Amino acid sequence: MNNQTWRRIGRRALVLVAVLLLCGVGALGACAWRAAARETKTRAEAAPRDGRFVRSTDVEIFVQELGPRDAPPVLFVHGMGAWSEIWRETLAATAAAGFRAVAMDLPPFGYSERPAPPAYGRQVQAKRILAVIDALGLKQPTLVGHSFGGGPTLEAVMLDQGRVKALVLADAAIGLDAVDSGNGATTRLLRWRWFREAIVAATVTNPLLTRRLLTQFMARTSEATDARIAMLQAPLVTQGATAAFGDWLFDFMTSREPALSRQPDAYRSLAVPTLIIWGDQDTTTPLSQGQRLAQLIQGSELTVMAGVGHMPQIEDVGRFNQVLLAYLRGQRQ
């Protein structure tokens, strides 16, 4: 082929790339528009009527409760993109076993108030958890943290061990060996608010992708039922949901906070009874991470759930509840 032919091919390739870029920008814009059109309700309007808001350090936190107010308390903290309702079956089982079961929405997820300016560091979140304990008058609660909620939950215990009776970590994303990527190309792009909100609108808060995203964390994908998908989608109608998730994502990607729970040496002084529950098929936080936590936390117990991925409380809720309740009963004696 002569030079003229190559130039013609090159021009066509450039036109194709330009069209693809425009289509991509257009698709992101359409997702952002749909998110804005969907996110119209206030937190109070959208939140379930059987829950309530309590004041934390700087924001109102949405909580759901079951069981007698004077029973031994158990406080549940969810992971990324979830909210208190993900614990519904475990809340019911825990309350039926004679405990006061409480689940909170960790900002910016669910129906809790989002801080302004955005503040989602692990210690900030841990202090919110401790403030919820105070606001509800929980005496020596057992804290249960899952996935990304496990970090703030563990941090809360490390900040004030005397306030807590026991700790349960389920496939906790602690990040002990995480490599700092705060200066990567992706992080630099996330500094542009419009870009990160468009990306979040096209993916995480896009109802069309909820099931696909959830099943990426699961080994037993059949448990991603229609009811659970609807549950996860429910808070997506709240005002600013996409923007808040984007703020959280940026904070997560860029944080260099010296949290205690990221420092292996800090575990030497941890003296709270601890149960670690882990799915052996977890590809998000592999079992090796749970095993390392069990080594670091003196006297802790590790229970491995066979055939389960990153979401044990929904992938095998019966077995998860059995393990949890056996531990809670043992701590009550």
Image (spheres, rainbow, N blue to C red):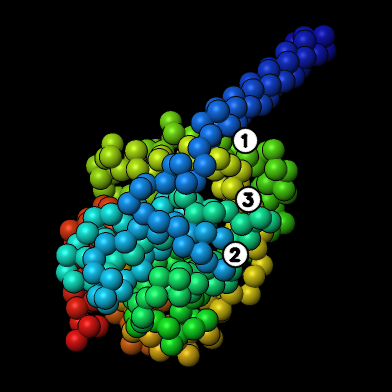
Dot 1 amino acid type: Ala
Foreground disc of the pair 2, 1:
2
Helix, strand or loop status at disc 1: helix
Q: How far apart are marks 2 and 1 (CA)?
A: 28 Å
Query: Which numbered circle lies on residue 247?
Result: 3
**Left or right of 203 on screen, residue 243:** right
Residue 188 percent location from the top left of the image: 73, 49
Q: Mark 1 points at which residue?
A: 198
N-term mark: 3 or 1: 1
Query: Which numbered circle lies on residue 58?
Result: 2
Q: How far apart are marks 3 and 1 (CA)?
A: 12 Å
Foreground disc of the pair 3, 2:
2
Q: Can residue 148 be seen in this view?
A: no
Q: Which of 112 and 158 is in front in this view?
A: 112
Q: Are marks 3 and 1 in contact (CB under 8 Å)?
A: no
At horizontal 52% and vertical 66% (from top left) the residue drawn is: 56
N-term mark: 2 or 1: 2
